[in-house]
Amino acid sequence: MNYPDLLPWHAIAGGLAIGFAVTLLLLFNGRVAGISGIIGGLFRLQRGDVSWRVAFILGLVLSVTIWKFFFALPEIQIETSHMMLILAGLLVGFGTRLGSGCTSGHGVCGLSRGSPRSLVATALFIVTAMMTVYWVRHVFAN
Amino acid sequence: MVGLMAWVSGIVFGLGIILSGMVNPAIVLAFLDVTGRWDPSLAWVMAAAVAVGSIAFTIAKKRKKSYLGGAIQIPSVTKIDVRLILGGIVFGIGWGIAGICPGPALVLVGSGSLEAIIFLTAMLLGMGVFEAIQQKHQ
């Protein structure tokens, strides 16, 4: 038996890093690291509420450059057509604002603070996404 | 200082997304493809993130102010309403189509991917449409 292969260590380590990022933003800035909410807040500019949002977003965008100083970027495969990417983007943008959260806000932060509302949202978007993949890959594709 | 910590948090968040493999939409779609070759990685990412995050929220709930002296703003809404449910469904459909959610979208844009730029532009447009409708109803 090969112990290193027993668990997906990259996934666990990455998850711990995400949890640490959530911790930093919560305890130092007092803010919840919900990415759709952080972007969405920029649609209604309020004094003193802009710079931390921009800084966080720039950090996310810049993370690839920092990663590449040390390691090769893992393989990235996007096989979705441009038309479907546009449709997906519109739905993700609208849906996350309507439902007040995405994978980070409801999925990570909401579950971390034991919010029943976030648990419902997370279960709903994961199941809906699974059904969508089933339709796209196994029903329409045939 | 507030900006600096947010910046560092964003970087760490992005490094976590890359390290976990979730920067690759194909791995996210493999988690969502339960009847195909299922890859449970995403569940491990969330479990690990929530394990750390729950400690942070336990500490935060006991504090009146953040370490930098600002207010700690934890959502207070508890209502499970139509908006939450519809939003979750609409987001889930979009997530299932491309395997990209807002965090990885920003990281992918940093990699210079044209597909990610197309997705992000549409995502911002979708958020803009929501804002426009929201403001009209106020």
Image (tube, coloured by chain):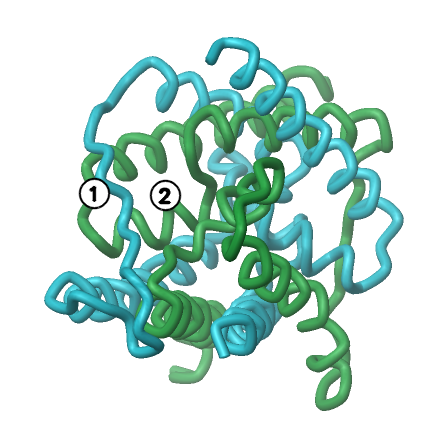
Chain colours: A green, B cyan
In the picture, the quarter occupied by the C terminus of chain A is: top right
Badge 2 density bin: few <14, some 14–19, many ≥20, Cα 10 Å: many
Which residue is disc 2 drawn over?
A106
Vertical arrangement, residue A72 with respect to residue B131, above or below: below
Which subunit holds the residue at mark 1?
A: A
Q: Residue at x 85, y 54 (%)?
A: B113
Q: Is residue B60 left or right of residue A133?
A: left
Local SS, label 1: loop
Residue B88 picture location, percent across and down: 43, 26
The image shows residue A70, relative to residue B26, as above or below, that is below
Question: Badges 1 and 2: C-beta atoms under 8 Å apart?
Answer: yes
Q: Which residue is mark 1?
A: A115
- The x, y position of residue B121, in whole percent, is 78, 37
Residue visible at 51% across and 57% down? A48
Residue A112 versus residue B42: which sits nearer the camera?
Answer: A112
Q: In the displayed structure, does residue A62 sit left or right of residue B14?
A: right
Residue A8 visible in the shown view = no
Percent position of residue A83, x then y: 84, 25
Q: Where is residue A111 drawn, in percent x and y?
A: 27, 49
